[in-house]
């Protein structure tokens, strides 16, 4: 049998076994947009539960919330943090109302879990109310963005781990291929030699920088606006609430939160979200560039670069027998395109804020968490299904170097740029090697030439 709950709009039947309430039920009816529910982001649910826990503890210590009710709320939050009741979070990630539906979804579930723990029935909100008790001293406008910020910190740990593991894989590949000499290229034209080890070391180095970038951007989320309530004036929050709530949230999460110095500014600003989205975009551009490189280096096998082999993952064509495509770099780049597009959505949503509140925070939240999830998954896929299994076509790489016009660059200090250019031009026109032309013209002795054009001497330290 359904239970009946009532709000400003009227009465609504709620399934008797549901821990959510009328506001969540209306959100389910109103916002059938993405099909992606709050339950799809468990770290965000955990973050919101921590926020409600900190709020209850703060209100109790300040004497505005009965201790028995506060304890029940805190125990309910602990159950959510432990992963229980995940199926009760049904609000769509895209919603109007600046996140009110998400805030009320957590408020209702916490209240009804607490009610049962206190020996009452779901919906008997006179004993523990989603509004008067769970949401006490709060507004969606401070609780929701604080939950988002804590969610970013949680999800950042996941993506940093995936990124660190990928960097480690690239470093190992660099060591494995340190002896393989190949031809470097600029403008897609032959340049000078380097090793495949140097190529993969460079990939590792550039991604390693993004670990600090992600962490620094995520740390901007440590400033929170709890206690701001609706517009930052703190109406309905008791004096001392903002500072104590930040302290309590820090204590239970182990993150070092601080209350914003200007709560009006903090309530309307989404700059920390823009910063984190930008860090994800930067990482995406690097990952996609790397994926593009690998597709070039493995192109062929007969009519391309063919310097490396990617692990064969699946048959490549429904019409061309024997074809194997670089499907993992392809899917990594596509993932990066989506994250880059998400960054534009975050930017536009941040710009669309008006006066004392940015009501577009739900799309910011959805796209940020989606981007982190996509990139984390893509990097695990990249590492396991591609990077770890790369091998080199060593003899082919060596032949490329020895037959390249690019090694003439090493002659500049010995015969001058103009003479080197003439040798290079003749080599191109006649098909002869640089090596043979130098000897033929008696420009240098064989011993001198062997020493100068030894590829190992041209790859640097």
Image (tube, helix red, strand yellow):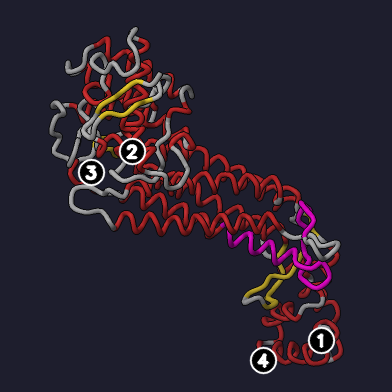
Mark 2 lies on a secondary structure that is: helix
Q: Residues within 10 Å of mark 1 (few under 14, many from 20)?
A: some
Left or right, 195 with respect to 445, comes to left
Q: Earlier in the sequence, mark 2 or mark 1?
A: 2
**Marks 1 and 4: CB-CB under 8 Å?**
no
User: Quadrant location of the N terminus?
Assistant: top left
Question: Residue, x 22% and y 47% (percent of image)?
Answer: 357
Q: Which residue is denoted by mark 3 in the rendering?
A: 267
- Furthest residue in direction top, as rendered: 119
- Image quadrant assignment for residue 53: top left
Residue nearer the viewer, 265 or 204: 265
Give the Cα separation between the discs numbered 4 and 3: 65 Å
Residue stretch in magenta: 287-316
Q: Which residue is denoted by mark 2 in the rendering?
A: 222
Looking at the rendered image, the disc whose residue lies closer to the viewer, 2 or 4, is 2
**Marks 1 and 3: CB-CB under 8 Å?**
no
Q: Residues within 10 Å of mark 4 (few under 14, many from 20)?
A: few
Mark 1 lies on a secondary structure that is: helix
Looking at the rendered image, the disc whose residue lies closer to the viewer, 4 or 3, is 3
Q: Is residue 239 visible?
A: yes
Q: Which residue is denoted by mark 4 in the rendering?
A: 418
Question: Residue, x 63% and y 55% (percent of image)?
Answer: 331
Give the Cα separation between the discs numbered 2 and 4: 60 Å
Q: Which mark is residue 438?
A: 1
Mark 4 lies on a secondary structure that is: helix
């Amino acid at each position: 049998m359904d239970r009946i709950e009532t709000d400003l709009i009227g009465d609504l039947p709620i399934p008797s076994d549901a821990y959510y309430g009328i506001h969540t039920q209306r959100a389910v009816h109103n916002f059938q947009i993405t099909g992606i529910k709050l339950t799809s982001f468990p770290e965000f649910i955990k973050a919101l539960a921590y926020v409600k826990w900190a709020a209850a503890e703060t209100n109790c210590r300040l004497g505005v919330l009965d201790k028995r009710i506060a304890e029940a709320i805190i125990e309910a939050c602990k159950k959510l943090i432990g992963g229980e009741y995940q199926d009760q979070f049904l609000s769509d990630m895209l919603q109007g109302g600046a996140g009110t539906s998400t805030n009320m979804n957590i408020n209702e579930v916490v209240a009804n879990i607490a009610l049962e723990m206190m020996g009452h029935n779901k919906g008997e909100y006179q004993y523990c109310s989603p509004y008067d008790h769970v949401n006490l001293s709060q507004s969606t406008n401070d609780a929701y963005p604080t939950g988002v910020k804590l969610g970013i910190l949680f999800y950042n740990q996941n993506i940093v781990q995936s990124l660190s593991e990928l960097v480690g894989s690239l470093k190992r590949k660099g060591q494995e291929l340190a002896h393989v000499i190949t031809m470097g290229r600029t403008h897609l034209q032959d340049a000078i030699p380097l090793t495949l080890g140097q190529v993969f070391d460079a990939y590792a180095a550039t991604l390693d920088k993004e670990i600090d970038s992600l962490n620094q951007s995520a740390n901007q989320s440590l400033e929170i606006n709890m206690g701001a309530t609706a517009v930052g004036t703190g109406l309905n929050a008791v004096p001392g609430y903002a500072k104590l709530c930040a302290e309590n949230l820090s204590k239970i999460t182990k993150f070092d939160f601080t209350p914003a110095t200007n709560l009006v500014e903090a309530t309307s600003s989404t700059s920390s979200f823009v910063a984190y989205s930008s860090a994800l975009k930067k990482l995406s551009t690097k990952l996609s560039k790397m994926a593009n490189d690998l597709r070039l280096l493995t192109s062929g096998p007969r009519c391309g670069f063919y310097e490396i082999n990617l692990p064969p993952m699946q048959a490549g064509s429904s019409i061309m027998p024997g074809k194997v495509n670089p499907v993992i770099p392809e899917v990594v780049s596509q993932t990066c395109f989506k994250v880059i597009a998400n960054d534009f959505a975050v930017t536009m949503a941040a710009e669309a804020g008006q006066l004392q509140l940015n009501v577009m925070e739900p799309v910011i939240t959805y796209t940020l968490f989606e981007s982190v999830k996509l990139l984390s998954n893509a990097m695990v896929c990249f590492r396991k299904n591609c990077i770890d299994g790369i091998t080199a076509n060593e003899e082919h790489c060596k032949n490329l170097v020895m037959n390249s016009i690019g090694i003439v660059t090493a002659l500049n200090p010995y015969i001058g740029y103009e003479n080197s250019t003439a040798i290079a031009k003749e080599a191109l026109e006649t098909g002869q090697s640089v090596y043979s032309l130098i000897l033929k013209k008696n420009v240098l002795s064989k011993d001198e030439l062997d020493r100068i054009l030894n590829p190992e001497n041209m790859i640097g330290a």
